Amino acid sequence: MSTPLAEKPTNRFIDPKVLVKIQNLELIARTVVEGFVQGLHRSPYLGFSVDFAEYRQYMPGDEIRRIDWNVFSRSDRLYVKLYEGETNTRVLVLLDISGSMNYSSGDVKKIDYARILAACLSYFAHHQRDGIGLLTFDTEVRAHLPASRRRGQLLNILAEIDRIEPSQQTEFRKPLRFLAEYLTRRGVIVLISDLYDEPQNIIAGLKQLKSKGNDIIVFHIMDNFELTFPFADMAQFEDMETKRKLHVIPEYLRTQYLAILNDHMDQIRKELSGARIDYTLMDTSKPLDVGLFSYLAARAKGQ
């Protein structure tokens, strides 16, 4: 009997501060992914995509919940639904490597959290026998490994992720336009970013990719201090992309800052939801595998 999707895996979730101390990305990805895959047990989730693809005749051992009873009533035969995740899905991870991703209020930088998330998703897609690819960007496309199932692809992607050194500003328009022009077949596109750009630049590009039949998932990476602004003493703040410095009295700025941030996030969430694009906020102070499991379980439940 399968475990209900609402339940979390019984294994202990991993503190991100522990993960960032491990130098081997493949080891990290394998540790995290195998943990939450065990937690999913025999759920119907078999891949990233939940788009219906075709039917297959029922075989002993198949999940009963996947039988299409409407087809049975018409044909008196048992068939199960197959989804894109069970065919030949291509998963492309878009990783923001702009300077703002270097921020950290503690031991875990946003880029390190994003790096591990990208590695885990790549490993997971590989585990599902999907084609995997990677595109890193800031104002331009910095690296692009087209989605593939060829031998050694996972190791190439992990090596590229390991080389990342954020420094430049963020600009979504050029990388997303490049991708819209480059992609000739639909697939799953996973964006990992702190989304520090004008909402219209992000949303317009993602909607264009969505209109081409792609399934899009957005993981919004934020430091807890960015979300809560807990600063108390007067301090000098520095923009990690423009290097502009500003002296700030936090108690005077907090309300305005949180209002602007929440408006930015609400606008993005609303627009993405309207375009049927998945959105998940990832707080770098929280275990990464908690967010991943919750998202994948919810996605599976949506089937």
Image (cartoon, rainbow, N blue to C red):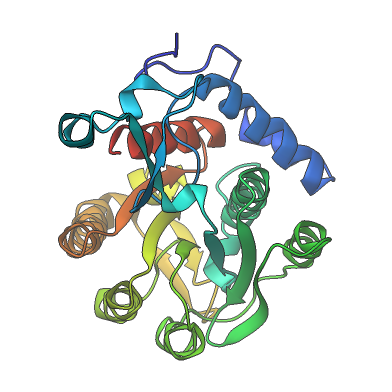
Furthest residue toward top? 1
Work out which quarter of the rendered image holds the C terminus and state it. top left
Please tell me which residue lies in front, 126 or 207.
126
Work out which quarter of the rendered image holds the N terminus and state it. top left
- Does 289 appear above or below 62? below
The residue lying at 27 percent from left, 52 percent from top is 254
Residue 201: x percent and y percent? 31, 81
Quadrant for residue 108, please give it.
top right
- Does 237 appear above or below 13? below
Q: Is residue 254 left or right of residue 187?
A: left
Residue 67, visible in the rendered structure: yes
Residue 21: x percent and y percent? 78, 39
The residue lying at 66 percent from left, 33 percent from top is 32
Please tell me which residue lies in front, 105 or 136.
136
Please tell me which residue lies in front, 26 or 128.
128
Number of labels in the image equals 0
Quadrant for residue 106, please give it.
top right
Q: Is residue 128 left or right of residue 188?
A: right
